[in-house]
Amino acid sequence: MKRWRISVLFFLLMPLACNKSLQIDVPSAQPVLVLNGQWQQAQQFIVRLTRSRGINDPVDTGSSLIRTYEVKNAFITIKQNNVVIDTLKYDSINFRYINKTKKTILSANYEVDASVNGFTDVSASGALPSLMTINTTLLQKNAAYDAAGNIMDKISFNFTDATASTDYYLIRIHRSDGSYANCINTTDTDFEKMIFNNPFTTQTCIDGNKLLLSDIHFSGQTKKVEVFVSDDQMTTGFTSGRVRRPYIELLHITRDYFNYIKTVNDYDIAKDNPFAEPTNVFQNVKNGYGFFTAYSIAVDTLR
């Protein structure tokens, strides 16, 4: 019996004897430029430029560290259809690069190039898609009930798809105060299902700023959109004596923007799901990090 107890004690203590603390030196990485910009039609050119943060750098991402990672001595040029049309100047108040006069135009191709001493030059490019027209917009109050018996309003409109190639769209639905509506319901299979890869949610609706679709099934045709949202979100508001109504936005976007929104959604879901596959957010900046795109946007009120 005594020998048995000694053997058990030996096996219990053996894992402790095998533990050994190791100190691993993580090599520091050479920082690279991080460029971000999203342009819409008839707007100025705006770019944010920072440097990447290494694994050993502070993890706090508060506003106090903006100046730690901002890059304010860059030379940034804008090409429109392969011709340099402007050089951006640094705006120290808003931590960004911006021009004063020129604005984006529809159906043009843009390239942004940034160079800074001590860094590899970075660039990104993309086309500004044509502007779509929102037709026959209608808000139908108390049109349906959801599975829980809550009253839903119906939003419907249509637009004619471009015919040149595969096109991508983003629909955003706003409350009267400008915030995005939540939990949009639809049976339209053209919309990307942005929530199904999260096993911990019973939600079957889509966020009001993530209604993505491509024209695979309606290329060159008129697309009718029908979605449902809780009636308490589609109310009229009053601000400074003015009537404020809910409204919709129809963005004609690039394939890059389409992929960017999908991967951001996957990344947000993976953060709270220990069983999810790691997700990298889509980026399209050469020799660096970041994301650049151009898009056109049409707006209409709901009434």
Image (cartoon, rainbow, N blue to C red):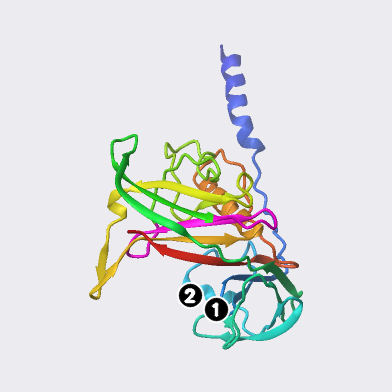
Q: Answer with left or right where residue 68 lies relative to residue 157.
A: right
Query: Any magenta on residue 163?
Result: yes
Report, in whole angstroms, how far the alpha carbon at label 2 lies from the one at label 1.
Answer: 7 Å
Contact check, label 2 and label 1, Cβ < 8 Å: yes
Let me know if residue 62 is in the magenta part: no
Location of the N terminus (image quadrant): top right
- Image coordinates for residue 148, horizontal then vertical, percent: 31, 35
Element under label 1? Answer: helix
Residue that carries the numbered disc 2 in the rendered image: 64
Q: Whole-percent x and y of residue 51?
A: 64, 72
| Marking on residue 41 | none
Q: Quadrant of residue 75?
A: bottom right
The stretch in magenta equals 160-180
Residue furthest to the left in view is 241
Picture layout, residue 40 above or below residue 204:
below
Question: Can residue 117 be seen from the camera position used here?
Answer: no
Give the percent coordinates (x, y) of residue 192. Answer: 55, 45
Q: Nearer the viewer, residue 46 or 24?
A: 46
Name the residue beneath numbered marker 1: 67
Magenta-drawn stretch, dominant element (helix, strand or loop): loop
The image shows residue 211 at horizontal and vertical percentages of: 50, 51
Q: Quadrant of the C terminus?
A: bottom left
Query: What amino acid type should be assigned to the residue bearing mark 1?
Result: Arg
Please give the name of the residue rendered at 48% of the width and 69% of the height, measured from the top-left corner: 62
Image point 59% across, 85% down: which residue? 99
* Viewer-proximal residue among 182 and 108: 108
